[in-house]
Image (cartoon, grey):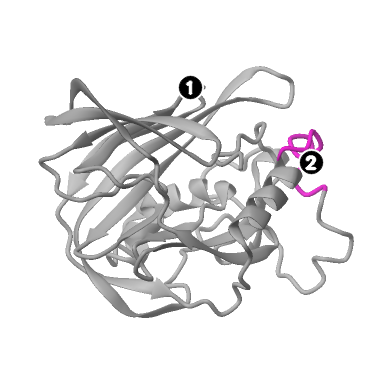
């Protein structure tokens, strides 16, 4: 099979809702195990696009390609390809006003999940830390069944952070959960200006947040998932899909490292580590 790279394309975006002021990139690391119980990590880079009224969190390379027009950058193309196996959502904080809206997926289905902007009930501490040249202050809060320690920079005036982390008097540049499973680490801040578009909800049926979290965790936390990531997909479900096994150029990898492309922004990996849910409840 010929190797090729499939760029995302602007996927169902609607009119502009805001204008970006800057972008903060994060290294998102999950500590987990492989199917044999050996220590393993999953790592992907996120971008938080910050506007004047809202923020948008998504996979970094996809953001550079789709939102900032870096279509010809091969590094972004390959980075986006490698990140596909995580099937990351696109999350908007503050749009619609007062809400978090997530365009999420549990392959092969898509879901639109919204909720009020979460209150982490942050406890501010006196500890400080220098991150990327910014003086950061410590805060501890709780959301989704996990306790988070965050470090925020008041000099970066925005109440946002990676994923759904928010609500502090400055941009969150680092965060980790109390169990040491998840780490969001500041990579860089870029001044980039572009329209912030809101994705079309066509093809994303709504699902209540609690129901979505329970459904996803039930499927992915199953012991079957790490041995066969498509165990829960019924026979015949692929009949209407265009399944393409692909890899991003270079020597052909082992079969388990290939991806099956279900749609332009959705894949089924053949090899995964044990799933660690960001939200327990």
* Residue 1 makes an appearance in the image: no
Please tell me in which quadrant of the rendered image residue 91 appears: bottom left
Q: Nearer the viewer, residue 73 or 251?
A: 73
Q: Is residue 185 above or below residue 81?
A: above
Name the disc covering residue 180, or none. Answer: 1
Within 10 Å of disc 1 (Cα), the crowding (few <14, some 14-19, many 20+) is: few
Where residue 128 appears, as percent x and y from the top left, is: 18, 22
Where residue 161 appears, as percent x and y from the top left, is: 31, 45
Q: Is residue 184 above or below residue 50?
A: above
Which residues lie in the magenta part? 221-231
Q: Secondary structure at mark 2?
A: loop
Name the disc covering residue 228, or none. Answer: 2
Q: Quadrant of the N terminus?
A: bottom right
Residue drawn at x 56%, y 47% as measured from the top left: 86
Indicate whether residue 99 is drawn in magenta: no
Within 10 Å of disc 2 (Cα), the crowding (few <14, some 14-19, many 20+) is: some
Where residue 106 appears, as percent x and y from the top left, is: 66, 56
The prevailing secondary structure element of the residues shown in magenta is loop
In this image, 250 relative to 186: left or right?
right
Q: Secondary structure at mark 1?
A: loop
Residue drawn at x 79%, y 41% as measured from the top left: 228
Please tell me in which quadrant of the rendered image residue 276 appears: top right
Mark 1 vs mark 2: which is more N-terminal? 1
In this image, 244 relative to 78: left or right?
right
Q: Nearer the viewer, residue 241 or 207?
A: 207
Where residue 145 appears, as percent x and y from the top left, is: 55, 36
Indicate whether residue 222 is drawn in magenta: yes
Residue found farthest to the right: 235
Residue found farthest to the top: 38
Residue drawn at x 63%, y 65% as measured from the top left: 207
């Amino acid at each position: 099979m010929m190797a090729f790279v499939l760029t995302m394309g602007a996927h169902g975006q609607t009119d502009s809702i805001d204008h970006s002021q800057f972008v903060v990139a994060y290294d998102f690391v999950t500590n987990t195990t492989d199917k044999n119980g050996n220590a393993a990590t999953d790592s992907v880079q996120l971008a938080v696009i910050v506007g004047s009224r809202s923020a948008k969190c998504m996979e970094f390379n996809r953001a550079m390609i789709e939102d900032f027009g870096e279509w010809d950058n091969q590094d972004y193309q390959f980075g986006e390809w490698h990140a596909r196996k995580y099937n990351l959502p696109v999350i908007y904080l503050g749009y619609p006003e007062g809400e978090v809206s997530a365009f999420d997926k549990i392959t092969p289905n898509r879901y639109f999940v919204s909720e009020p902007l979460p209150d982490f009930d942050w406890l501010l501490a006196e500890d400080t830390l220098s991150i990327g040249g910014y003086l950061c202050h410590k805060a501890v809060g709780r959301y989704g069944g996990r306790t988070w320690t965050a470090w925020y920079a008041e000099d970066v005036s925005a109440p946002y952070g990676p994923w759904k982390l928010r609500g502090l008097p400055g941009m969150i540049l680092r965060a980790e959960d109390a169990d040491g499973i998840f780490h969001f680490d500041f990579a860089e801040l870029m001044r980039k200006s572009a329209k912030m578009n809101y994705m079309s909800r066509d093809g994303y049926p709504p699902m209540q947040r609690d129901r979505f979290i329970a459904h996803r965790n039930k499927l992915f936390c199953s012991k079957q998932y790490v041995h066969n990531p498509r165990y829960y997909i019924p026979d015949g479900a692929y009949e209407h899909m265009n399944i393409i096994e692909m890899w991003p150029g270079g020597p052909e990898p082992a079969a388990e490292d290939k991806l099956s492309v279900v749609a332009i922004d959705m894949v089924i990996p053949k090899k995964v580590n044990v799933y660690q849910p960001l939200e327990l409840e």
